[in-house]
Image (cartoon, rainbow, N blue to C red):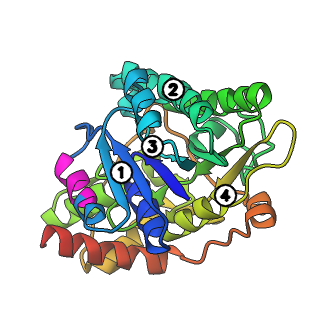
Amino acid sequence: MTALVTGVAGFIGYHTAEALLARGEPVVGIDNLNDYYEVSLKQARLGRLESRQGFTFRRLDFSERDAMSALSREFPDIMHIVHLGAQPGVRYSLENPYAYVTSNVMGQVVMLEFARACRRLEHMVYASSSSVYGGNTKVPFAVGDGVDTPQSLYAATKRADELMAHTYAHLYGLPLTGLRFFTVYGPWGRPDMAPMIFTRAILKGEPISVFNHGKMWRDFTYIDDIVSGTLAAMARKPSGTPPCAVYNLGNNRSEKLTDFIATLEKALGRKAEMRFSPMQPGDVEQTFADIESSRRDLGYEPTTPIAEGIPRFVKWYRDFYRV
């Protein structure tokens, strides 16, 4: 059962491909290796995958129609799609909005059309985001809550992905499942996210910016829990009419940012110099996942608290960057 994984050199894409290969499933991975963050990290992830039997890589942009059309002809036996590629990040969407529309909106349409062309396709799983909950004040966030108040263009594009998926499921009967990821962290993580930013600064003795004067909470979710939920979703195609579903994948705990920093300080054996700052445009004060539907339908159960996940991340960081 060949699976296509988009964004395979990215954080979640890399770990998902690793898990699929570990259980003997062939993976076709695609990535354009853009320079949104350090390409060397993407290449290092990719190098580990390319040493594995059953892995095939193609460097291409999934928002390019002709390239994806050619890929569908080259690999007609694709049965599962795990669409994890995207232009991520809330703050960068203020600087380069066009990148988000190209990757997250056009890219989603191209991937849905690609799925239609895959005659053996059983199911497509795609990445959404906890950002779609926007300005919601009711916590924890449940999949049935309103998602009509996005606080960033990034959030708006991910909500658009969900709406387009619903449309394609309705029109063409495509089985489609969206996963709303909550603040994913762990080994091989993204350099633009707080764990990497804080770790790098603390080890260099540089100050860290703590936004909203520290009054922020996040549902930090360890990468292994995200991968287990993604694979569980992949194995269970929606049975409703239309055949589409959306699930939260989070840790089901909302940690205060200053507590997260304290856990990181303990793992690093160093104190952070914190500079408290106002809330950044596009950001939200709290995220917190209600995972009842994920538990019920997917058997999803996160097992890694930050007290365990952060030390694992720090060990990887020190080993990889030799610090």
Give left or right: position of 222 versus 165. Answer: left
Please name the residue shown 24% across and 75% down the image: 270
Mark 2 neighbour density, 10 Å: few (under 14) some (14–19) many (20 or more): many
Specify the segment rendered in magenta.
39-46
Q: Mark 3 points at which residue?
A: 75
Judge whether 76 appears above or below 311 on screen.
Answer: above
Q: Mark 1 points at which residue?
A: 10
Mark 4 neighbour density, 10 Å: few (under 14) some (14–19) many (20 or more): many
Please name the residue shown 57% across and 59% down the image: 219
> Measured from the top left, where is residue 313 in percent x and y?
34, 72
Quadrant of image for the N terminus: bottom right
Spatial distance from mark 4 to mark 2, Cα to Cα?
Answer: 22 Å
Mark 3 neighbour density, 10 Å: few (under 14) some (14–19) many (20 or more): few
Mark 1 neighbour density, 10 Å: few (under 14) some (14–19) many (20 or more): many
Element type where label 1 sits in the image: loop
The residue under label 4 is which amino acid type? Answer: Ala
Taking the magenta stretch, the answer to whether it contains residue 41 is yes
The residue under label 2 is which amino acid type? Answer: Val
Q: Name the residue under label 2.
A: 110
Judge whether 143 appears above or below 19 on screen.
Answer: above
Q: Which of marks 1 and 3 is in front?
A: 3
